[in-house]
Image (tube, rainbow, N blue to C red):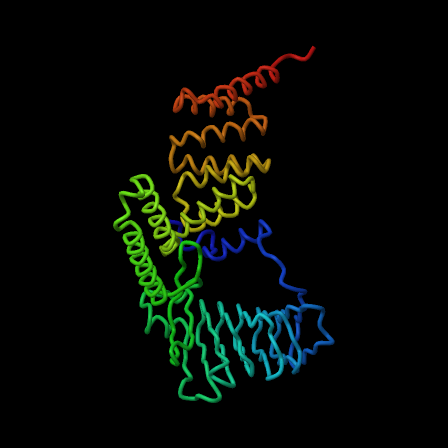
Amino acid sequence: MADERTDGRSKAEMLRDAKAQFGDKKPEGNEHKISGQTGGTVVIRQADLPDKPVLAIEGNTDTVFELAPETSVIKVLVSGCRGCTIKLPAGCRIITSVLEVWSCADVILEAGIEIGTLQIDLCEKVQLMYTKLAHLGQLVQAGVHRMTVAFGDAEDQSFETGIAELRAAHKPELSETDRDTQFVTRLVDGQLLTEEIIRLANDFPTTHREKALHDAEAARKEAALGEIAATMLSGVGDKLGEAKAAEIQKMVGEVAATSGNDGDTGDDARARYKRELGTEQFKLGEFQQAAVHYTESIGLDDTVAAVWANRAMCWLKLAQPDKALADCDRCLSIDASYTKAHFRRGVALLEKGDYINACKSFRRTLELDPKNAQAKSSMMLAEKKLSMSAAPEV
């Protein structure tokens, strides 16, 4: 399993970097950034904003930011602020109902509107002040120290949260320096409920409680499908014939199998899922997107030789032999007898003009797989190029 942190970066940060590298993010609107403010009050009005504004409040100190009534933005992003207050009075609107706050300290949020998703990451000393309990959609947090949440119309529901409180109430093993483990607080059946977020294999966020409900429903549907099949076949099996009856049973089995698809949790399951996505994209000729999925799989589990070899093939398709060579070497450090990695290593070296080492890699491929026709022809090509490069000029 991959380490929780690599080169000082968490797995979540590595995946974000990978997505950014491959251009996976799509713009939601036009960013309107307010930065470098120190002190005073900044009132944000519609006339000051571009079309489809994404409001980014970044790197400010001891400043009050207020969204004027009747002002609409796509979403609000607050980062790197110290001692700031964000005011969202009744009448303003966040179209996506998403507000993200990260890497901030001593910040206050006054919410007079409903916020569907409020995400607080890597912050210290945060005060959330909702006018109404009903304005709380879901509060998602990770790596937060000392956060208070209060409701103007339900003072008895106010609570304190953060890593210390979450460790005491939900996860004793939670580290003081944890940056990745997410928790969500919502109203469930009229009660505030805080739960750890887990990820299904397809990266869908859920909780243990919700997964248990989902699994129970999937089991109920599977049983119902079995009963339907039994009813369909009862008394008519002979008329249908063995082939048709078997086909019906197979169809029911396939539906039952897919009903629970991607229901596993944990990094192993997510890594497998990302690997499968990569393979699907590669078959479609989408080599860059395949490389993205393989990179995500590696970020979750870097011990699978095949993923390194598969990403190396993507690099070859994208004419990046240096990256392909590095991935082949990593693959072979895990499994020295991985034939495809030796062959792809040879191809990368051939493209780089290193014919001697390319021959060595193709020779090793043939030692492992003597009938490999591609390796034989590539070996001949590498030897020919080597011979030509060594021939004296006339």
Q: Nearer the viewer, residue 328 or 29?
A: 29
Residue lying at 49% horizontally and 85% vertically, measured from the top left? 132
In the rendered image, residue 190, in percent from the top left (x then y), is placed at: 39, 81
Location of residue 383 with respect to 21 vertically, above or below: above
Question: Which residue is outermost to the right?
Answer: 47
Q: Position of residue 146 (x, y in %)?
A: 44, 76
Report the front residue among 112 and 390.
112
Q: Is residue 44 above or below residue 229?
A: below
For residue 182, side relative to residue 226 (left or right): right
Percent from the top left, x then y, of residue 153?
47, 89
Between 293 and 282, the one nearer to me in the picture: 282
Quadrant containing the C terminus is top right
The relative height of residue 273 versus residue 149 in the rendered view (above or below) is: above
Which residue does the image show at 53% across and 76% down from the upper left? Answer: 115
Residue closest to the eye, 347 or 216: 216
Q: Is residue 40 above or below residue 301?
A: below
Q: Which residue lies most toward the front here?
A: 239
Residue 104 at x, y percent in the picture = 53, 71
What residue appears at the point 43 percent right and 37 percent down from the top-left corner? 331
